[in-house]
Image: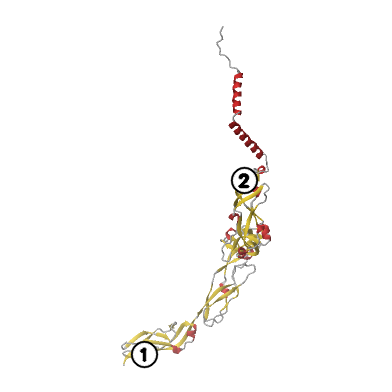
Amino acid sequence: MMNSRPPRKSSSGRMSRLSRFFSRLINNKIFLALFSLGMACVIWAVLIASDGTLTRRKVFNNAPVSVTGEASLISRGYIVTDNILELVPNVDMIVEVTQGTYDRATASVYNPHFELTQISGEGENTLNVVFSSQVYGQVISCDPSSVKVNVERYITRRIPVIVELTGDLPSGYYLKSYRTDPTSLTVSGPQSQVAGVSRIIVRLNQADLTPERMTDRLALAVELQKSDGTKMVSDKLTVTNQSVITGSVIVETELIPVKSVPVDAETFVTGTPAEGYRLKSVEVAVGSIDVAASREILDAISVITTDAPLDITDAAESVTGYVRLRRLTGIDSTLPTEIGVRAEIEEEKLTRQFRSLTIQVRGEGTGKASVGSNRTNVRVTGPYTAVKALTAEDILLYVDVTGLEAGTYTLPVGASVLNVPDVSVELDTTEVHTVITEK
């Protein structure tokens, strides 16, 4: 019976073919040369990688820079006026490190910085970049490697603190006192800048004060000012209080109430005017004065008076001057020292009677005139000095017959006072019978 399956290939045949292939490959000179070169490279790489003493270059870009030795430099009496970290914020470094420390070597390990102990004195100085450690390898390149800076003397001055008032106080209250604690501060820094500081300002906003806290303590920020009032700004200046850096001072305030007190004008004048004159009125610059004091003192004050009134003795005209106000105990400085006063003096009126003065005939008629009763009493009223100086001869009484024909008339009696226009004249007889006869 025949077997239908194909005959099985033997494994010995395949092995024989592989053996012949490798034999030919090994005997190939080109293959052997390439294989030897590859093995040499592998062995060299292994040897290099296992030798930690061999060095490689490593590049650090934009490595941050720091500055040290500032306190030491200041203790020597110097300070750098430039901002070094603005001039050189970072550097580029190339370092040669060993293979064993390659991964551990970082820019912070080298710590590139400027050491201010390199400074020798005032003026321009060149600072080189230095490194804290090079245990992982040497820095063979640094860019930039140096910087030029300006150096000045470091000085200290004590400068007073001044309070500037802003805003409005609460209505009905007065800021009795305010003071700073401390009254001055120490400013330190470059000589040119410290010399330019004239004052230290703190601004007190009075609107922040409240009657709920009649005494208060506020922490206010300080401002350095030049002599022209402009603000001095510099990061090189240090403000200290008892060696402690500060940016503010304490301002202590005290409020007291205010009351409007009337002025007693009548007490501001003393003496008697000249004969024939009188005091018409007293005018003061203000009718009342705002007075600040404790509530108890304000409640006890009703008027403002003076102990040195304006003297009008024998005055024949108005008198103007300043009167010192009475200083009351407990009153704050809101009360002025003196006040303007005007005493208005006017001349009095005087009435005098002149008896049996003659009535004269004035003017020309067509005939001869005569009056029935040619005497009367007269009262003259006017300025005291003028009326007092009058005599009967200064008063003229008359009837005017100008243009009248012969006949009997009742004519008014006229009167005039010589050289005294501002007077009034009153007659007992105001009309008289007048007869005009033919010539």
User: Looking at the image, which residue sits at the far top?
Assistant: 1
Q: Is residue 222 left or right of residue 356?
A: right
- The answer to which of 3 and 148 lies nearer the viewer is 3
Please tell me how crowded label 1 is: few (under 14), some (14-19), or many (20+) other residues with Cα within 10 Å: some
Q: Position of residue 413 (x, y in %)?
A: 39, 85
Please tell me whether mark 2 or mark 1 is closer to you in this view.
2
- Identity, as a three-letter code, of the amino acid under mark 2: Lys
Q: Is residue 291 above or below residue 404?
A: above
Kindly identify the residue that appears in the image at 48 percent across and 82 percent down: 383
Element type where label 2 sits in the image: strand
Q: Which mark is residue 58?
A: 2
Q: Position of residue 342 (x, y in %)?
A: 53, 75
- Compare marks 2 and 1 and give the one earlier in the sequence: 2
- The answer to which of 221 and 420 lies nearer the viewer is 221
Q: Which colour scheme appears in the figure?
A: secondary structure
Q: Position of residue 338 (x, y in %)?
A: 58, 73
Please tell me how crowded label 2 is: few (under 14), some (14-19), or many (20+) other residues with Cα within 10 Å: some
Please identify the quarter of the rendering in which residue 433 is found.
bottom left
Q: Is residue 155 above or below residue 46?
A: below
- Identity, as a three-letter code, of the amino acid under mark 1: Ser
Q: Is residue 143 above or below residue 3?
A: below
Can you identify the residue that label 1 sits on? 370
Q: Which mark is residue 224?
A: none
Regarding residue 175, the answer to whether it shows in the image is: no
Q: CA distance from mark 2 to mark 1?
A: 149 Å
Rendered-image quadrant of the N terminus: top right
Regarding residue 384, the answer to whether it shows in the image is: yes
Q: Position of residue 12 (x, y in %)?
A: 61, 19
Element type where label 1 sits in the image: strand
- The answer to which of 67 and 280 lies nearer the viewer is 67
Rendered-image quadrant of the C terminus: bottom left
Q: How many marks?
A: 2
